[in-house]
Amino acid sequence: MKIVALFPKATEGETENNILDDQTALNLRPFLEEKGHELVVLKNGEEDLDKHLKDMDVVISAPFYPAYMTAERIEKAPNLKIAITAGVGSDHVDLEAASKHDISVVEVTDSNTVSVAEHIVMTTLILVRNYEEGHHQSEDGTWNLTKVTNHAFELQNKTIGIFGLGRIGRLVGERLKPFDVNIQHYRRSSQEDTDFSKYVDFDQLVETSDVLIITSPLTPETDNLFDYDTISRMKDGSYIVNCARGKIVNKDEIVQMVKENHIQGYGGDVWYPQPAPADHPWRKMPRNAMTIHYSGMVIEALYRIEEGVKNLLTDFFEEKPFPEKDVIVNGGQITSKSYAKNDKK
Ligand code: NAD
C-alpha cells in the first residue's frame, strides 16, 4: 500500500528529541517497509500532496502541520481508504466528504490531552498576570512598572468558563481548581455538574466568565462561534484562551475587541490556516499570548502519537476494528459523539 505522510520539517541541530518530523517520521519507515508498504513523506508541504492523490491508500498528518484533505482532494483520491490524524482533532479532513467516499478518519485520542491542558493553564496565567509585557521589558532594558501592572491581576477568585468540557477541558479544570477559582462549563453532550465545575448554559458561560477557555472540536456548529456578537456579550476585561482550533474564533473581530480593551487578552496556539501566514493579525495583536501550534506536540506526547499511529495502521492492515474512542468517521458515517451533528445540544 502507498502511505503518504506530511510532517513538519526537521530543524538542523534540533533533532535529538523530535520524532514527528520529516526525517524520523514517527519511526514509520522501518515499521511500514518491513510489512512491504511504501511510505512517502512529503517534502514541500501540501504542494506535493496533490501529486500523490491519484494512487495513495493512506494519508497521515498532524494537526500542527495539517494536510488539508478537502472535498476536492478527496474526490481526486480514488484509492484512499483511511486518513490518520497523528494527534487529536480531525477537522483538517472534510468529514462529510470522507463519509461519502467511505474513507475512515481516525485519530490518537488522549495522546496529548495533558500536554494541551498544561499549555492552557500556562496561557491563562500568562494573560491574567500580564507576563508578556513584563518579560518583554526585561529583554528590552526598560522598567516601566505601571505599564505592566495596569493589566496584571491575580487568578484567585476569578470565574473560569470552559466551553466544550471533554478530555482536555476536564484536565484543565482539575489543574486550575487549586488556584481558588470558580469553574463553570458548557458542553452539548451533558448538563451535569462535575466535581470541580458547575454546568451553565452557553449564554451564562459567555456573559459571566472572566476567562473563557475553548476546548471543543471545530465543527460546523463551532466554526466562527466566537464572533463579534458572542464576544461583545463577554464581560469587559475578560480573557479568551483557545488551544482548540483557530477557526472557532473570528480572526479579525477578536483583534478589534482586544484593541478596544473589551477583551483584555487572547492566547492559545491554534490558527487558521496553518502554518499561519507571516502577516496573520494575531501575531501582532496587543496583549496576546499566542504561540505556534505546539501545545500537543511536546516530546512525551509524540511517543504516544507514534504508538497510536502504529496501532491504527496495524488494525487497518489486519482488518480489525479501530478502538471506538479513536474513530471520527467509519462505515460512511461520522460516528464520533464530539463531531456528529445529532449530538444533544
Ligand atoms: P473531546 O471529544 O474529549 O471533548 C470535546 C468536548 O466538546 C465534548 O465534551 C463535546 O461534547 C464538546 N462539544 C462538541 N461540540 C460542541 C458544541 N457545539 N458545543 C458545546 N460543546 C461541544 O475532545 P478533547 O480531546 O478534549 O479535544 C478537544 C479539541 O481540542 C480537539 O477536537 C482538537 O480540536 C483540540 N486539540 C488541540 C490540540 C493542540 O495541540 N492545541 C491538541 C489536542 C486537541
Image (cartoon, rainbow, N blue to C red):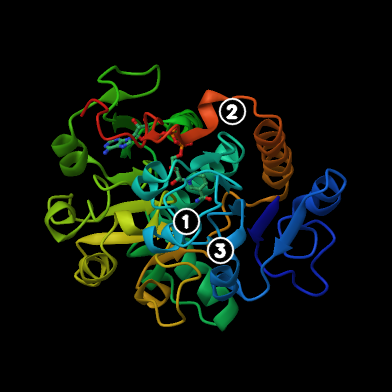
Of the two numbered discs 2 and 1 in the rendering, the one whose residue sits closer to the viewer: 2
Type of residue at label 1? Answer: Ile
Type of residue at label 3? Answer: Lys
- Identify the element where label 3 is drawn: helix
Q: Position of residue 215 (x, y in %)?
A: 39, 42
Q: Which residue has dot 1 on it? A: 126
Q: Nearer the viewer, residue 302 or 29?
A: 29
Q: Is residue 282 above or below residue 153?
A: below
Q: Which residue has dot 2 on it? A: 322
Mark 3 and mark 2: Cα distance apart in space = 25 Å
Q: Is residue 10 above or below residue 337?
A: below
Q: Residue at x 55, y 76 (%)?
A: 47
Q: Which residue has dot 3 on it? A: 54
Q: Position of residue 141 (x, y in %)?
A: 57, 83
Q: Residue at x 71, y 56 (%)?
A: 20
For ligand 1, tell me if the residue under mark 2 lies within 8 Å: no
